[in-house]
Amino acid sequence: MTRIPTSDRDIIEQAIYLPMLLTILNRDLIVVNTSSFKLKKPYLELIEETMKAIQKDLAEVKRYLHKNNIKVERLKSDDAFTMYMFIYKGYEEEHNYFNPRLRNRTEELLRYYLFERYKNIHLEKKA
């Protein structure tokens, strides 16, 4: 049983997923730069602005983790699972994440940062 409250666990998981998103978007930047698109600039700007938003959120997550004495370490990975150690206020917990679940959640977050985030901004401006 975990000692970590759900709200803190959600933030810990952001510390896992957000760096993955940045890695993916960095690779995408390279692909777009080397592609034969006629008009690369809009794609590059979309990726770069998305990366800025993720970096901002990741900085907030890191501040929260530091302030609350929480650490996240990736221990090992195989074909099916990736193991992380969470150090939460002096207690160590190991958690296994199913790799397809990591991939699917990362994809959901990528959709959010590329599309849904703009819908939320647009709705806030209307109000």
Image: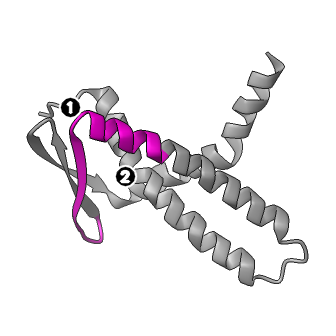
Mark 2 residue type: Ile
Q: Position of residue 125 (x, y in %)?
A: 80, 24
Residue 76: quadrant of the picture: bottom left
Q: CA distance from mark 1 to mark 2?
A: 16 Å
Residue 96 drawn in magenta: no
- The residue at 14%/30% (across/down) is 3
Dividing the image into 4 quarters, which one contains the C terminus? Answer: top right
Numbered circle sitting on residue 16: 2
Q: Is residue 55 above or below residue 90?
A: below
Task: Residue at 46%, 52% (x, y): give it.
Answer: 18
Image coordinates for residue 95, horizontal then vertical, percent = 20, 49
Task: Depth check: give the residue in front, 71 or 13.
Answer: 71
Report whether 106 appears left or right of 113: left
> Toward which corner of the image does residue 123 lie, by quadrant?
top right
Tell me, for residue 4, which label it has, or none: 1
Judge by depth and name the residue closer to the eye, 106 or 51. Answer: 51
Q: Residue at x 40, y 55 (%)?
A: 102
- Label placed on residue 64: none
Which quadrant is the N terminus positioned in? top left
Query: Which residue is found at the position 54% from the left and 66% from the top?
Result: 24
Mark 1 lies on a secondary structure that is loop
Secondary structure found at label 2: helix
Question: Residue 116 falls in which quadrant of the image?
Answer: top right
Place of residue 122 in the rendered image (x, y in percent of width and height, measured from the top left): 79, 30
Amino acid type at mark 1? Ile
User: Most extreme residue toward the top, as rendered?
Assistant: 127
The region drawn magenta spans 58-80
- Horizontal side of 97 relative to 125 (left or right) equals left
Q: Which callout, 1 or 2, points at the residue further toward the start of the chain?
A: 1
